[in-house]
């Protein structure tokens, strides 16, 4: 069993096309879980993740903040604390922080 | 893409041995994701999940409340908002709410 505080996990930049967006790999290669990785994504006000697609899914739960998720047609859907989002494999998507404080959410991906 | 509020997902009792503990299957059979299910577990004050083991892992992130997770030796470890927990396959474990408000956490399991 491994227990850790999210603040003790390094923040890394959330890849090409990201602006003021960071990932903490809470349960990742170090724990070597068999099936999936648990990450905390943090986007600062005005920031965004890349508008992109990939062949794997996202399963998301919003912890705090206000923002939108952009869908495949470019339409924006509001998200806030308590919202769950399922992004199927290959669906284009982007997260944007439209609020005045940090937007943070759990984002699970397959290994 | 599916977006939903956790409050709109039915609460079900968290299995045999659970006391005042409930699960909301946020991304489950209905969404039919390829690899894993995203659940929100809610334990009321004084409640607990079963002390049990199974051949699959848990990946957990605490949303709110105060509690403990009991490990394989029966030792209790405090958990609160912002803590991530990795329970490997076959490790015996139990969650208990030791606070005065609800303990809620994301708990991801393989499909």
Image (cartoon, coloured by chain):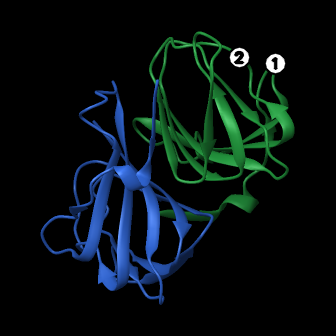
Chain colours: A green, B blue
Contact (CB < 8 A) between labels 1 and 2? yes
Q: Position of residue B65 (x, y in %)?
A: 52, 77
Q: CA distance from mark 1 to mark 2?
A: 7 Å
Query: In the rendered image, which quarter is residue B12 located in?
Result: bottom left
The mark that comes first in sequence, 1 or 2, is 1
In the rendered image, which residue does mark 2 sit on? A51
- Can the viewer see residue B57? no
Q: Residues within 10 Å of mark 1 (few under 14, many from 20)?
A: few
In the rendered image, which residue does mark 1 sit on? A17
- Can the viewer see residue B84? yes
Image mark 2: chain: A
- Check chain identity for marks 1 and 2: say if they share one: yes
Q: Position of residue A4 (x, y in %)?
A: 62, 64
Query: In the rendered image, which quarter is residue B17 located in?
Result: bottom left
Pick the front one: A109 or A85: A85
Q: Secondary structure at mark 2?
A: loop
Q: Which residue appears at 36% of the width and 50% of the height? A: B8
Q: Position of residue A28 (x, y in %)?
A: 58, 42
Q: Which residue appears at 24% of the width and 74% of the height? A: B51
Q: Is residue B99 left or right of residue A9?
A: left
The quadrant the C terminus of chain B occupies is: top left
């Amino acid at each position: 069993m491994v227990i850790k505080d999210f603040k003790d996990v390094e923040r890394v930049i959330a890849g090409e096309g990201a602006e003021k967006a960071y990932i903490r790999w809470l349960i990742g290669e170090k724990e070597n879980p068999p099936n999936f990785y648990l990450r905390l994504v943090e986007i600062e006000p005005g920031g965004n993740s890349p508008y992109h697609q990939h062949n794997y899914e996202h399963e998301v739960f919003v912890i705090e903040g206000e923002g939108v998720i952009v869908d495949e047609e470019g339409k924006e859907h509001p998200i806030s604390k308590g919202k769950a989002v399922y992004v199927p494999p290959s669906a284009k998507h982007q997260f944007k922080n439209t609020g005045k404080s940090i937007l943070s959410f759990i984002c699970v991906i397959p290994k």
